[in-house]
Amino acid sequence: MAATKLHVLDCGSMSCDLTWLLLKPGRSIRSRQEREIPAEWYPCTTHCVLVETDDGLLLWDTSCPRDWETRWAPTGLHDFFPYDRVTEEQYLDARLGQLGVAPENLRYVVFSHLHFDHAGNAKMFGSTGAQLVVNDKEKEFAFGFDGLFTGAHLKSDYDGLDFQTVSGDTELLPGVTLIEAPGHTPGTMSMKVDLSETGSMIFTSDAIYMGDSYGPPATPAAIVNDLGAWYASVEKIRGLAEKTNSQVIFGHDADQLWSMRRSPDGFYS
Ligand SMILES: [Zn+2]
């Protein structure tokens, strides 16, 4: 097995109205008895994953940038998803540093998709020699629209970078499989990592935001590019998780992230 160690990098949280993440009556959507209760704001946690493999270090996603407030301002979303629950040691560069890892040490940087809370530090790896990997449909969409941004795709995060693309489900390295899971965006991917002691872990990224989204039944969210594809991807992941007895780690589930072994205090092997 080629993936030997896996580090979960907790990069703090954005804050947002829970309704963005979960359209669920009784939780984010109010009944008449609850109509006076303010919207619930949620710690929208953001994480990256560092995988040690026989072929070098692989980073899954790059979280949010330090200059989020100015960088995201053109989109208006800085007021809806402020990255304001983060400490100095939680920024991605600090998290890597705590493990003695510099950007130059990474062999692969894989992007679940190119939204600004996943590609926010992509340019940290622009000239380090790392292979930047993204799904082909995601690249086509992210470079294909007119203007500087659409939704949470912000071209300044990733323009000028040289991406390698994968299509369909792809075993990128022995023990590391990228799973095509569109719906949230046209080319969202999840990642399955097989470890000798822990077994398999599936990092869904935004294919599935939280445990409440997974259900069953699956519960959608406010930002979905293609709702039919989203439902199919959730069930695809559920089927794969059951077949491979995998743990499923969601993209923005605070309670789950905070219950995990997090770097630098712990890791999975
Ligand atoms: Zn996200």
Image (cartoon, rainbow, N blue to C red):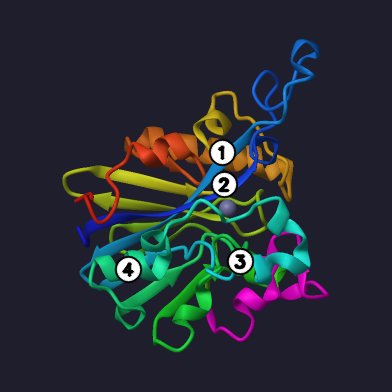
Closer to the chain start, of discs 4 and 1, is 4
Q: Which residues are magenta?
A: 143-164
- For disc 2, the marked residue is 207
Camera-side mark, 2 or 4: 4
Q: Which residue is mark 4?
A: 96
Residue 198's disc is none
Instruction: Count residues near mark 3 (Cα–Cα under 10 Å), then give few for <14, some for 14-19, many for 20+.
Output: some
The mark that comes first in sequence, 2 or 1, is 2
Tag 2, which secondary structure? loop
Magenta includes 154?
yes
Please report whichever mark, 4 or 3, sits nearer to the chain's N-terminal start: 3
Label 3: which secondary element:
helix
Give the x, y percent position of residue 116: 61, 64
The residue carrying pointer 1 sits among few (fewer than 14), some (14 to 19) or many (20 or more) residues within 10 Å by Cα, namely many
Amino acid on which the number 4 mark rests in the picture: Leu
Q: Does residue 80 appear to the left or right of 83 in the view shown?
A: right
Q: Give left or right: position of 7 versus 224.
A: left
Taking the image as shown, residue 141 lies to the left or right of residue 268, namely right
Asked whether the beta carbons under mark 4 and mark 3 sit within 8 Å of each other, the answer is no
Disc 2 + disc 1, Cβ < 8 Å? yes
Residues at marks 4 and 3, CA–CA distance in whole angstroms:
19 Å
Q: Residue at x 73, y 47 (%)?
A: 226
- Whether label 1 touches label 3, CB < 8 Å: no
